[in-house]
Amino acid sequence: MRLASSGLPAARRRALGRDRIASGAVLVAAGLSVLIVALVIIFLAIRATPVITDPAIGLKQFFTSSNWQPDANIGGFGTTMSTFGALSPIAGTLAVTGLALLIAVPLSLSLALVLVEANPALGERYLRSAIELFVGIPSVVYGYLGFVILLPLLKPFAPAGADGSGILAAGFVLSIMITPTITALSADGLHAVPRSLKEASMALGATQWQTMRKVLLPAARASIISGVVLGMARAMGEALAVALVIGDVNVLDVKSNGIRALLKPFTTMTVTITDGVNNVTINPQGAAARYMLALVLLVMTFLCIVIVRYVNRNAERPNQ
């Protein structure tokens, strides 16, 4: 290869040299990102090891109990024993994220269809600008608006003594936060659908709605699911906005309140991790339990990424 390239013009050799440098830089950056992720996983796993080795915590209690009081006996001066049941924050994260997707996905698909197909002039002139504006709003603003506007609206419907904070408020706030992400990726997927598919559908006598529902949305499935899963990952990892509207209570009495339990204070993994950050240095057991929660949240996020890759790979596979 060296002999073959020795007869090339100087400009060509310089271009090949720059290509090799750029290729090496990209490989180093990719390797560095993988290394950072691996170090984060190792760090969390090491810090969470006491959950497995310490009989006072134990994996069985951690994943099957809903009694979470890791700071009850800090320094041995507390009157009750510390407990480390993380079932409530895990269930809270799943419930809030599921509710957010239930609200955001239909809204996002509707916006994407308006942007691309139903009314592109209106979409490009007004909706796209509004969506880009929503993307840039900090999460604390969403949480604060939910706290001062949404909670008073929900309070009359909440059980006695509750202020409206809970799963419903958190799910609604998160749905507004993730709608721009799902909308943007869905719209990009619809833009990428070959126009020949739409024209063929219309030529066969299909209406515009039938074309969107039976041709465009299935063809853009990979991008839509990617947007949904990435929005779900963001909803799972949000802490500050959720903390302002969920209440941070580890008990949810569904039997006594029924559906109104959605309007009673609850918690999520991110809120639980942050609520005891001041006690990390003086409460090793509580810190280990919170590191395990962080590891569980990281694994759930990785599963979201795996789902995206699996869907995209199947979408690219030609039909047999």
Image: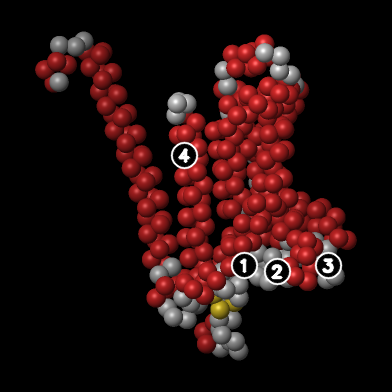
Of the image marks 2 and 4, the number of the one nearer the N terminus: 2
Are circles 2 and 1 on residues that touch, CB within 8 Å? yes
* Gap in angstroms between the C-alphas marked 2 and 3: 12 Å
Are circles 3 and 4 on residues that touch, CB within 8 Å? no
Of the image marks 3 and 1, the number of the one nearer the N terminus: 1
Are circles 3 and 1 on residues that touch, CB within 8 Å? no
Residue placed under numbered mark 3 in the picture: 159
* Gap in angstroms between the C-alphas marked 2 and 1: 8 Å
Q: Residue at x 65, y 43 (%)?
A: 178
Does dot 1 land on a helix, a strand or a loop?
Answer: helix
Q: Amino acid at mark 4?
A: Arg
Residue placed under numbered mark 1 in the picture: 88
Residue placed under numbered mark 4 in the picture: 309
Are circles 2 and 3 on residues that touch, CB within 8 Å? no
Image position, residue 140 (x, y; %): 67, 52
Of the image marks 2 and 1, the number of the one nearer the N terminus: 1
